[in-house]
Image (cartoon, helix red, strand yellow):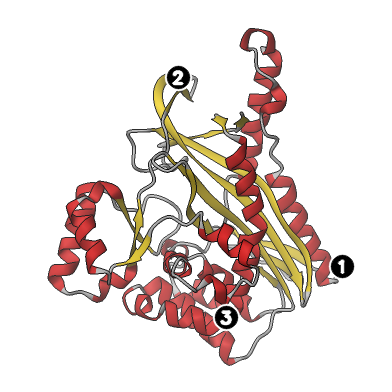
Amino acid sequence: MSFPKVYWEQALELAPLFNELVHRVSLDGDFLQQTLARTKEVDPFTRRLLDIHSKMMELNKKEDIQLGLTRSDYMVDGATDKLLQVELNTISTSSNGLACGVSELHRNLIRHHERELGLDPASVVGNTAITQHAEALATAWAEYNNQSAVVLVVVQAEERNGRPVAVVYFRAGYSPADYPSEAEWRARLLIERSSAIKCPSIAHHLVGTKKIQQELAKEKVLERFLDNKSDIENVRKCFAGLWSLENDNIVNSAIESPELFVLKPQREGGGNNIYGDNLRETLIRLRKDGSNEIAAYILMQRIFPPASPSYLVREGTFVRDNVVSEFGIFGAYLRNKDKVIINDQCGYLLRTKAASLNEGGVVAGYAFLNSIFLT
């Protein structure tokens, strides 16, 4: 996809700022507990995560070594030409391996057909997401300083071993479906209480909730966590409009013009957002019931990126359509006490879908993996 270099460079500059922001917010246990207190009352999954976090606060458990592998997703807003953040992912930042393969595929295609296309293959941005995330995990293992320890990746299938665990990476654990019984919750608590480096820790996980994203967008909240005025300005200018459902004026606007908003629950993994008439009906129902369930959602300004024609390929068949794209910058953050060992951007994920679609999941069949061609 043709992509202006100015937005690419802006997103790269933001990556270490969001890495540091996630770390600092995760250290403020009271902020996490207070901000998510009402959500906890109506969202059982968030409640269980907060309960584990509360237990760690009671134990006064300090994590000397902290590892975060994140992805901050953005769209370019066609109305303002601004780069706006869609969400910040702090757990199971997937598709980095596939994204690297697509970038290499497109670069090789242009290289083989450079004369006919008149394009420079060097303009396809190389993607190092999988390598840099692997290096971050390996560096965290080295910081743990136990040669017999292993890196444990938490997936849906049950795994057992009798080795010391240096690093735990959660590829699963972001959805209620990953905790079908009390056994999984006991395992999550056991991991959190252990000496292993968690990626993410329960605090880092909670920083990625939609409610925390909305709270950070409020005036004077970033100043609680970041010191540099320029950094604060750069982070704040990429925030889209974010509101709680306690804002009656915004709720009225969303009911009147639902096409301008997205209703987001506290869920990860795609396919959970509410749009259009369903958004209006959900807001009317919540208001009529006077339900505390409003605390389980936030409203976000809907971003309308500029559409462009493209060819979409699935299972050997292609179609031409007008498309829009969302791209994410992977990040890695590793800290041992006061020493920051890694704070860097780590490649990207570009997902392209038909402009007529609301949802954008690749696995669900809506979107396609793509690569960036800088212009």
First of labels 3, 1 by sequence position: 3
What is the spatial separation of the Cα atoms under label 3 and label 2, in whole angstroms? 49 Å
- Where is residue 113, by image quadrant? top right
Give the structural element (helix, strand or loop) at label 1: loop
Residue type pointed to by label 3? Asp
Q: Give the x, y percent position of residue 126.
A: 70, 35
Look at label 2 and name its amino acid.
Phe
Q: Position of residue 91 (x, y in %)?
A: 56, 61
Q: Amino acid at mark 1?
A: Gln
For the residue pair 12 and 185, the one nearer the viewer reads as 12
Q: Return the residue at label 2.
A: 318
Name the one closer to the observer, 208 or 176. Answer: 208
Q: Residue at x 73, y 62 (%)?
A: 151
- Left-right relation of 299 to 316: left
**Vertical relation: 236 (above or below) 103:** below
Q: Which mark is residue 28?
A: 3
Please rate how many residues cluster around mark 1, counting C-alpha atoms within 10 Å: few if below 14, some from 14 to 19, many from 20: few
Task: Give the position of the N terminus as an image quadrant.
Answer: top right
Residue under the image location 62 percent in, 44 percent down: 348
Which numbered dot is residue 147? 1
